[in-house]
Amino acid sequence: MCNKCKKFDYKWIIWIVSAVAAITAAITTVLVIKAKQKKDDEQLEEYLDYSIQ
């Protein structure tokens, strides 16, 4: 392979790895936010149950 072709291949590999990392980070962020909201909702519900009693 020519030197120019090798650089082109490395650019694509780096681009793909970066894209996968960005997508993974976005999915992880969404899951963490949803888990936190669920926990907050449960704590609020528990607080309201105790405050009513």
Image (cartoon, helix red, strand yellow):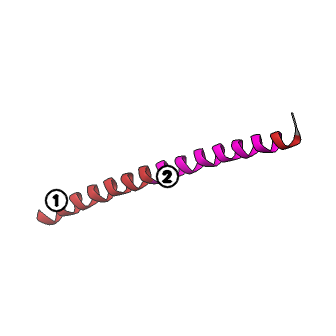
In magenta segment, residue 28: yes
Q: Residue at image x 25%, y 61%?
A: 44
Q: Residue at image x 21%, y 58%?
A: 45
Residue pointed to by mark 2: 26
Indicate the position of residue 53 as horizontal and vertical percent values: 11, 62
Q: Amino acid at mark 2?
A: Ala
Q: CA distance from mark 2 to mark 1?
A: 35 Å
Pointer 2 or 1: first along the chain: 2
Q: Residue at image x 53%, y 46%?
A: 24
Q: Quadrant of residue 5?
A: top right
Return the residue nearer the eye: 22 or 4: 4
Residue stretch in magenta: 6-29
Q: Residue at image x 70%, y 43%?
A: 12
- As helix, strand or loop, the secondary structure at mark 1 comes to helix
State the mark number for residue 49: 1
Q: Amino acid at mark 1?
A: Asp
**Principal secondary structure, stretch drawn in magenta:** helix
Q: Residues within 10 Å of mark 2 (few under 14, many from 20)?
A: few
Indicate the position of residue 39 as horizontal and vertical percent values: 33, 55
Please indicate whether residue 2 sits to the left or right of residue 33 in the image: right
Quadrant in which the N terminus is drawn: top right
Please indicate whether residue 27 sits to the left or right of residue 8 in the image: left
**Are the residues tagged 2 and 1 within 8 Å (C-beta)?**
no
Return the residue nearer the eye: 50 or 40: 40
Please indicate whether residue 16 sits to the left or right of residue 43 in the image: right
Indicate the position of residue 20 as horizontal and vertical percent values: 58, 44
Q: Residues within 10 Å of mark 1 (few under 14, many from 20)?
A: few
In magenta segment, residue 27: yes
